Amino acid sequence: MASKTVLLIEEIKKIIRNVHMGVFYMKATKTTPYPYITFQISDIGASKKLELDYWADKPDSIELETLADNVGDYLNKYTLNK
């Protein structure tokens, strides 16, 4: 993995952890407490696409919806220029 990608992954973790501490690149461990977030990065031309997945162990989706809303609100106000 290129060093720029590693730096981007660490920067994304740092940014999302301002909202929720349980954030992981690609996958979490089997012992990771719920809820948590996984993410991946794709190249789209000269840009990057960030895909977030939210995980919980409760049958209703309220906790995940709230978490996704909070992260989305935070990211919509954030600009990363690296």
Image (cartoon, helix red, strand yellow):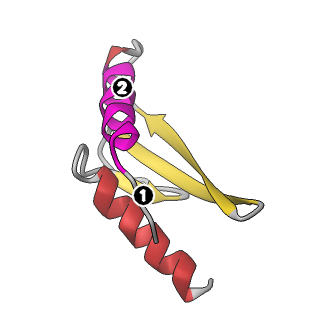
Residue 18 place in picture, x, y as percent:
22, 51
Residue depicted at 39% across the width and 38% down the height: 76
Instruction: Please name the residue that numbered disc 1 is placed on.
Output: 24
Say the numbered circle drawn on residue 6: none
Asked whether 48 falls inside the magenta stretch, the response is: no
In the rendered structure, the answer to whether residue 71 lies left or right of residue 2 reads left
Question: Residue 35: x percent and y percent?
Answer: 33, 37
The residue labelled by disc 2 is 69
Report if residue 29 is visible in the image: no
**Residue 56, above or below 66:** below
Residue type at tag 1: Phe
Q: Residue furthest bottom?
A: 3
Q: Nearer the viewer, residue 35 or 4?
A: 4
* Magenta stretch encompasses residue 65: yes
> x, y percentage for residue 30?
43, 53
- Would you call the spot at circle 1 few (<14 residues within 10 Å), some (14-19), or many (20 or more)? many
Region rendered in magenta:
63-78
Q: Which residue is located at x 63 percent, y 58 percent? A: 48
Disc on the earlier residue, 1 or 2: 1
